[in-house]
Amino acid sequence: MDSLLIFSPRGRARFRAAAIAAVCAVLVMCGLPTPAAAAEPGPVPATVASAEQQDDEAPPLALALGDDGVVTGSAFDAAATVANTTDADFRASDLRVSIGDALADNEAIEAWLDGSGGTARTEIASIPVEEIAPGESSSVSAPVPTGNIPSGVYPVSAAYGGATAPITTRSIVIVTGDSPASVAMVVPITGPVAVAGLYSASTLGTLTGADGLLTAQLDAVDGTAAVLAIDPSIPASIRVLGSAAPATARAWLERLMSLENDRFALQFADADVSPQIAAGLDAPLAPTHLGFALEQATIDASDDPITLSSLTRIDDDAAPTVYWPSPGSATDDTVSTLVGGSAARVLVPASATDDGSAVLGDDALAYDDALSDALLDAARMSDAPTRARALTVAKAEIWLAAEQSGGPLLLALDRMGSDDLTTDDAGTEIVDGELDLSAEGLDEAIRAALDTPSTSHVGLDDVLAAGSGHVGVAATTEDPLREQAVVDYRAAEPGLAHIATALARPDHFLGQVRAEAQRLLSVSWATNPEGWLTRAEDFVALNADRAVAIDIQELQQPVQLLSAEAPMPVWIRNDLPYEAKVTVIATPDDPRLSIDRRTEIIANPDSVTRASIPIEARVGSGDVTVHYTLQSATGERIGPTRDVAVTVRADWERIAVVALAVIVAGLFGSGIFRQVRRRKRERVESHSDDDIRGESA
């Protein structure tokens, strides 16, 4: 079977050591003992591939080549190791290396490597391999001349004939010419989307733990030249918690800020800008306030004023403005609205440009999404040899695309956030399931594009400076549901702003809702459309409830006023998690009842607060209706007016007092009468006893 090889010039010692390391890996996979030569020290090349056995008798063949298959001169060094895993001797033979004509494009590269096309007929080297006894291996290396062939990607084959059946392998070699190709890569730093607004402490603890998604992302970009696209809600979530944030989260943030990578900020919560512009917004939604999440300890410990910008900052210096819509969602109108004559840029996939090419403009920066997706797919592969082969193919294709672009080639890995965030029975946010992306895989993908001899990485400033002219784009995907979500939120805003006037801190409430709206628009929701639809419907219903969350509860029974003065009970319902400061306006429809017209009340969050309003019956009795209206500090009416029927029976109090006095007097008189009778009876009985005793004497 065919396998992937990479050829490049380096010293022979390095290749011999690399080949020995490669065969050790092969023998371990095959369950065979490692040869003694494998203990020799030496670097392991970035990519090592081995030929699988064609049948049960065919041995593995491992070839290791330096510089990731890049040729900068007129020759490359090849190292090979043949391991005899059979019971028969392998005769002395040659390892024959051949080369073919340059591969013109990505399709030709793929066809050559998968064995469906291409040829390599020109033999350029023959490396002797001595006889190999059963259970033994042989390692060889030799320079392979290529001559003065022009730059390009070339097919290379190697064949070993000493086994029972010949073993052949296929590979590619990149001849770079005088200079490497310029490449830039954008890597997103984003998290899960199924949260409301900011990340909780428990979620941050999971994401920044040893095996967390955010940790994997930083591990992968640390030490590379990748341009970071950072969701500012992540550092904000950590900063608002202060000392209450997990130690791993605080360390993660410190590490992020210390990285030297170029960077720019995504929209808060990585909200997709395309549906916002399509819904008629002149500019994307921005966070308004994060005070709703601030811990008091954070406020107490801060020496400087805590502002929105201080919570969301991603760099100590001002970062350029770059928008990154959901891939394929932006149109020319989206780009022109977002840029609007400013220095801002919009990242768009090359597949959405007019000619399908990755070009850098003054308004849009088109990145090669096909190559970017190939890198990310390779990063997700758990099998190291399979991942190495995929990355080798990607490296050749990246070099070829960069050479053909005539300028910096821009790559951008798609969002890597998990949408598996759920809650347990206690309401604690947890990440459910295992992540399909390792730090190792992501790191190898980034380095395959930026850290090879065939490419020279450039920074964000170079990418922005390379822009020239207008890049035409057209949406390749449409999402009217997400556009409608923006419309629904904007329609709910007046009602939310109205109810917020009743709160002690309206900016906290409105800031929370805005953060939730932006999280709903997160780009990563595209991977979970069913979950998004449920969340969007719930958000519409929740905002409808919030808009009527504060009012006076309606009394089901009329109030009986049996006294000239009494407190009238009023219950204020507040379903929001914020303290409300309201004024109850009471207006009776009859002058016989006097009542305090304005009563200020503090309504506790998420509860029903009872208040007492003094009332007084002036004259007479009868039925009176009291109209209760709730008013905010700005004078706006909150909720409907409640009518309370009051039956005034103030005269009953006097009647009751007289009746009580009569009853008390009667009881008192009855008691005196009974006491007198009892004492009289006792005197009579006493005299009778004296008479009896006298007669007896």
Image (cartoon, rainbow, N blue to C red):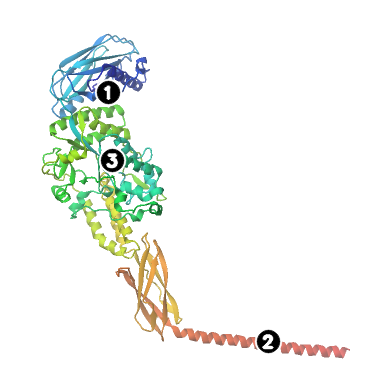
Placement of 592 over or under 94, stated as above or below: below
Q: Position of residue 471 (x, y in %)?
A: 12, 43
The amino acid sitting under disc 1 is Ala
- Residue 416, numbered circle: 3
- For disc 1, the marked residue is 49
> Taking the image as drawn, is residue 349 in sight?
no
Q: Residue, x 20% and y 35% (percent of image)?
A: 458
Q: How far apart are labels 1 and 2 at the CA level?
A: 120 Å
Q: Nearer the viewer, residue 93 or 438?
A: 438
In the picture, measured across the screen, residue 159 lies left or right of residue 586, that is left
- Residue 675, numbered circle: 2
The amino acid sitting under disc 2 is Gln
Mark 3 residue crowding within 10 angstroms, few (<14) / some (14–19) / many (20+)? many
The amino acid sitting under disc 3 is Met
Q: Position of residue 481 (x, y in %)?
A: 22, 52
Residue 26 quadrant: top left
